[in-house]
Amino acid sequence: MDVERYIEESNAIEGVFNDAAVQQSLEAWRFLEDQDELSHEVVKETHRLILKNRQPEVAGKYRDVQVVVGNDRPPAPGRVPGLMSDLLERKPSSGEEAVRWHVEFEKIHPFRDGNGRVGRMMYWWHCRNLETEPVLWKASEREDYYDLFSEEAVNRDLYQTVDPGILENWEEDTVERFYVGKRVLNKDSSEEVEITVKGEDIFIQKEIMKKIEEALNK
């Protein structure tokens, strides 16, 4: 991995082209690549190193204001620490899962600025640990990169459509709740999981669907 090239492209996606910004990001990467685990402190310090000269007032601090990103409204600032804790507990096991982790990081948008650059750096860190070459997202192809964050792409990657008939062996009240798009009860773990309903299509997280299918096939 030619880290300097990755950094230059990552910065260019955000319209940052100066050499000083490249050097700050190199310093951040040298810090990050020495870390064995990701934590709140590691994420914040990486962000601080990237923005310490450019935006010192927000560098290394989770946002305390509501922001709007294009047509998206990220979670309220009070939810950021908890959402980041949940994300940091997840350990991608493939390059594809590392991309999904990156997408979720950007959806949380934990900082006021610099989320793209620090988020892509976290993605590189995951790929390094997985011993897989990270995707080089180029500024000239930024629209393809932004497509990763479209609602359609997120649903395609994280959810799948479900035939309600697969739940015919479940208790009636559970199926009813599934139909109305509230929650579905995972019988094995007694844990409730969110599902999404759009028109006549029902979406459920792929990981949860695997558990349901395994339970029904026992």
Image: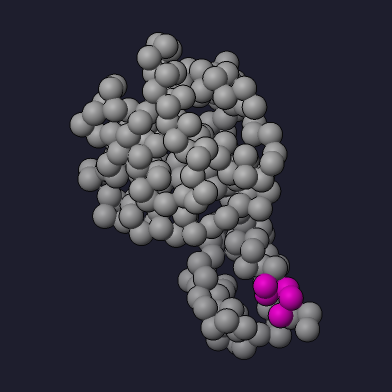
Residue found at the very far top of the displayed protein: 18
Q: Quadrant of the N terminus?
A: top right
Instruction: Please report the residue visible at 53 percent of the width from the left and 61 percent of the height from the top.
Output: 196
- In the drawing, does residue 204 fall left or right of residue 43? right
Residue 154, compared with residue 202, is above or below; it is above
Instruction: Please report the residue visible at 70 percent of the width from the left and 68 percent of the height from the top.
Output: 210
- In the drawing, does residue 184 fall left or right of residue 96? left
Which of the 4 quarters of the picture holds residue 204?
bottom right
* Depth check, front residue: 154 or 100: 100
Where residue 123 appears, x then y in whole percent?
55, 39
Where residue 150 appears, x then y in whole percent?
53, 39
Residue 73, compared with residue 194, is above or below; it is above
Residue range (magenta): 211-215
Residue found at the very far front of the displayed protein: 34
Q: Quadrant of the C terminus?
A: bottom right
Where residue 73 appears, x then y in whole percent?
35, 43
